[in-house]
Image (tube, rainbow, N blue to C red):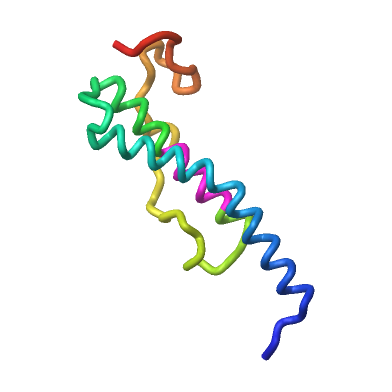
């Protein structure tokens, strides 16, 4: 069964949209992974927490993109592990999950 030209064009457009949305997230995940493996030197517990939060956020965004831009699962590019709820994330020093990390260098 051949797909119509319109369906093929829609699939190609969706693949491009998915790629354009996920490419920056995959780059961020790659750099976070490098840092977590020690490529930038020893990490403090606070730095490890921040990097874990960044990794979790990129995984959530990838899952959101996957759920909204439907293609075959094998072409997704992002793993689909169970993600922690925001309530499971550690509190920042100020006690607020939504507050950004303090400005300046990390201790």
Q: Is residue 2 left or right of residue 58?
A: right
User: As displayed, is residue 94 above or below residue 29?
Assistant: above
Dominant secondary structure, magenta:
helix
Q: Which residues are magenta?
A: 56-65
- Nearest the eye: 55 or 83: 55
Question: Where residue 107 sits: x, y (%)?
Answer: 29, 11
Name the residue at the left extreme: 42
Residue in the picture at 29% in, 27% down? 48
Look at the image and say whether residue 89 sits in the magenta stretch. no
Residue in the picture at 58% in, 50% down? 65
Look at the image and say whether residue 57 sits in the magenta stretch. yes
Name the residue at the right extreme: 6
Residue in the picture at 67% in, 65% down? 12
Q: Is residue 56 left or right of residue 35?
A: right
Q: Is residue 40 left or right of residue 22?
A: left
Q: Is residue 101 left or right of residue 11?
A: left
């Amino acid at each position: 069964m051949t797909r119509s030209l319109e369906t093929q064009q829609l699939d190609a457009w969706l693949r491009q949209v998915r790629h354009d949305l996920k490419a920056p997230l995959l780059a961020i995940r790659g750099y976070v992974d490098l840092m977590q493996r020690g490529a930038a030197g020893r990490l403090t517990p606070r730095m490890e927490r921040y990097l874990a939060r960044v990794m979790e956020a990129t995984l959530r965004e990838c899952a959101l993109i996957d759920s909204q831009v439907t293609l075959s699962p094998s072409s997704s590019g992002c793993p689909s592990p169970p993600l922690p709820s925001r309530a499971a994330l550690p509190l920042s020093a100020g006690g607020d999950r939504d507050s950004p990390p303090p400005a300046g260098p990390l201790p």
